[in-house]
Amino acid sequence: MIKKRFYITTPIYYPSAKLHIGHAYCTTLTDVFARYKRMRGFECYFLTGADEHGQKIEKNAASAGKTPQQFVDEIVDGFYKLWELLDISNDDFIRTTQDRHVKVVQDIFSKMLEKGDIYLGKYEGWYCTPCEAFWTDTQVGPDHICPDCGRPVQMAEEEAYFFKTGNYLDSLLKFYDDNPKFLVPESRKNEMINTFIKPGLDDLCVSRTSFSWGIPIRENPKHVIYVWLDALTNYITALGYDSDHPELFKKYWEDPECEIIHILGADITRFHAIYWPMFLESLGLRKPDREFVHGLLMMKDSKMSKSKGNVVDPFPLVERYGVDALRYYLTREVTFGSDGSFSPEQFVERINADLANSFGNLLNRTVSMINKYFDGVIPEYKGDVTAFDGALRTAAESTVRLYESNLDDLKITEAIAAVNDLVSRANKYIDETTPWVLAKEGKIEELASVMNHLANAIFVAAKLYEPVLVKSSPKAFDQLGIDENDRDYEKVYKFGSIGGTKVVKGDQLFPRLDAAIEVEYIQGLMGLRKE
Ligand code: MSP
C-alpha cells in the first residue's frame, strides 16, 4: 500500500554530555529524509528529543554540583542550538521530563501492570551503569564486560518490576516474518534473533530503586520506571497518546495510511526491535512499519566518546565551512546503514571534490557562459540538438528515478551519489560539446541548446540536492534566475522546463579549501594537532 503520510523519528539523545557529530549524523540524515518526503508533497511529521532520566544523568549532575533538572536544562539548550544551526526541520522536540510525557508513562505502566504483563519480583544480574542495562552471565562473559560499551559491569540485586517478554515473543517472531522490511539492514534481524532471542530472552526488568532521577511508579513510588520503558514511549507520548489532544496520535500512529519510521543507531537496536514492539502490543497499539538501523561514525578505529577525548564538535565545523558542507559530508561520506569513520582529510577532500570542483564549478561555468554568449538569458529548450544532448537529458531523467527509488528505501547516501554522477556527467558534457568552439564557429543553435541542457541539468541536480544543501540549492536557483514560485519538484520530471530566465552571477557556492590549512585546523579542533 502506498502510504499518504510519514512519521519519522530519531532516537531521543541523552543530555549526559554535549552532542557530537555522531548524533548530528543521525539527526541530519533523518532530516534529509523528512525534507525529501515533504518536497515530494507528502505530509511528514518529524520528531526528535531528549532522554533525560537515569542514573548516569543523576551522577553527572551531582559531579557538576547541579540538580539533575538544572543539568539537563543546560545541555538540552545546546541540543536546540545545534539543531537550529544544522537547519533541522523537526516538528516537535520531546523531553522526557515534560508533564505530557511523565503522566502518560505512568499510565502506560499502570495499564501493563493491570493487564498482568508487568509483575513485582527480584532482580539479580550484571549491571552496566553507563548503558543502564542489566546483562546475563553469557553476555558479560568471563571478564564481566558490558557487551555494548566494553566497560566492566557490577553484580547488583534489587526488588523490581518485570515485563513478561514471553507473552509476546511468538508474536514478535511472527511479526518479523510477516514484515521483512521492518528491520533493515537485514543483518540486524539475524543479530536480534541469534544474540538475544535464541539464547533465551529473560523478562525485562522495568523498574529501579537504586536511584531516584526517573518517573516514579504511581502504585509504588519508591521505584522509578526503567529509563528504556520511559524513553521508548516518547514516540507516542509526543503525539498525544492517552491525552486530551489525541489528534496527532490518530493521524500519525493509528491511521494505517501513515508510515511510521524510526531511525536509530546500531547500538540501540535491541531496545527498539525487541522490547518496543512488545510494549506496543501490550498496549494494543500498532507497531512501526520500519526501523532503519544506521552504523556508527567512528574516529579512525575507535568509537567516538567523550571519555576517549576524541569527539568532534559540529559547531566550529559549521561556523567555518557552513551548514551545507557538514550536512553534505555526513550524508555522502558514510553510507547510511554501514559504519564509517571521520577524518579531517576526507572532510576537506569531499567538499573540494564534490561541492567546489564539481557542482559549484558547473554552476559557475554555466552562468558565465550564458552571460558571455546569450547576454545572460538562458536559451529556451528546443529538443535535443547536438549529438550529446540526448545523453545528458536521459542521464538527468534516469537520475531522478534512481534518486527516488533509493531515497524511498532510505538509501540516502546512494541517492546523493546518483546526483553527483549527474553533475559529473554535465561537466563531461561541457568537454564533449566544447561551447567555446561552437561560439567561434558561429553555431548558435547548438550553442543555445548546450546552455539550455546545462541549465536544466543543474536545476535537476540542485533540486535533488536540496534536502541536503538547504542553503546552496536555493542560491543555485537564484543564479539561474528561477523565481521562488517556479522551483517546484514536478519540474524535475520535465527536462527542458528551464529556459528564458536571466541568470544572476553570484559568489562561488563552495570556495575551494586549502587542504593543508584546513586539515590542520580540524585536527586542532579535535586536539590531534602535533604542536
Ligand atoms: N537515549 C538513548 C536513546 C533512546 S531512544 C528511545 C540513547 N541516546 S544516545 O544519545 O546515547 O544515542 C542515541 C543515538 O545517537 C544512537 O543510537 C545513534 O543513532 C546516535 N549516535 C551516538 N553516537 C554516534 C556515533 N558515534 N555515530 C553515529 N551515531 C551515533 O542511546
Image (spheres, helix red, strand yellow):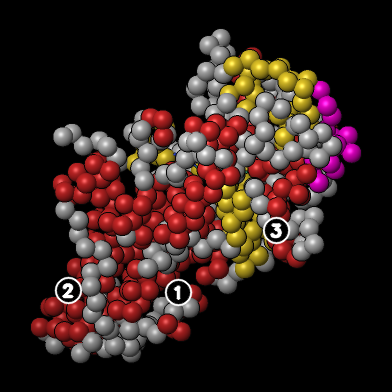
Which residue is found at the position 42% from the left and 40% from the top?
Answer: 297
- Would you call the spot at circle 3 few (<14 residues within 10 Å), some (14-19), or many (20 or more)? many
Residue type indicated by callout 2: Thr
Residue type indicated by callout 1: Val
Residue type indicated by callout 3: Leu
Q: Is mark 2 on a helix, strand or loop?
A: loop
Q: Give the range drawn in magenta.
A: 107-121
Q: Name the residue under label 2.
A: 434
Q: Nearer the viewer, residue 312 or 407?
A: 312
Q: Where is residue 435 in the image (x, y as percent from the top left)?
A: 18, 77
Q: Name the residue under label 1.
A: 492
Callout in the foreground (1, 2) = 1
Magenta: predominant secondary structure element?
A: helix
Label 1 or label 2, whichever comes before in sequence order: 2
Q: Quadrant of residue 92?
A: bottom right
Image height of 365 relative to 128, above or below = below
Q: Do the residues labelled 2 and 3 touch (CB within 8 Å)?
A: no
Q: Is mark 1 within 8 Å of ligand 1?
A: no
Q: What element carries label 1?
A: helix
Q: Name the residue under label 3.
A: 239
Per the model, the C-alpha gap separating discs 3 and 1 is 34 Å
Q: Position of residue 463 (x, y in %)?
A: 42, 70
Q: Residue furthest top?
A: 142
Per the model, the C-alpha gap separating discs 2 and 3 is 56 Å
- Left or right for 272, reference 72: right
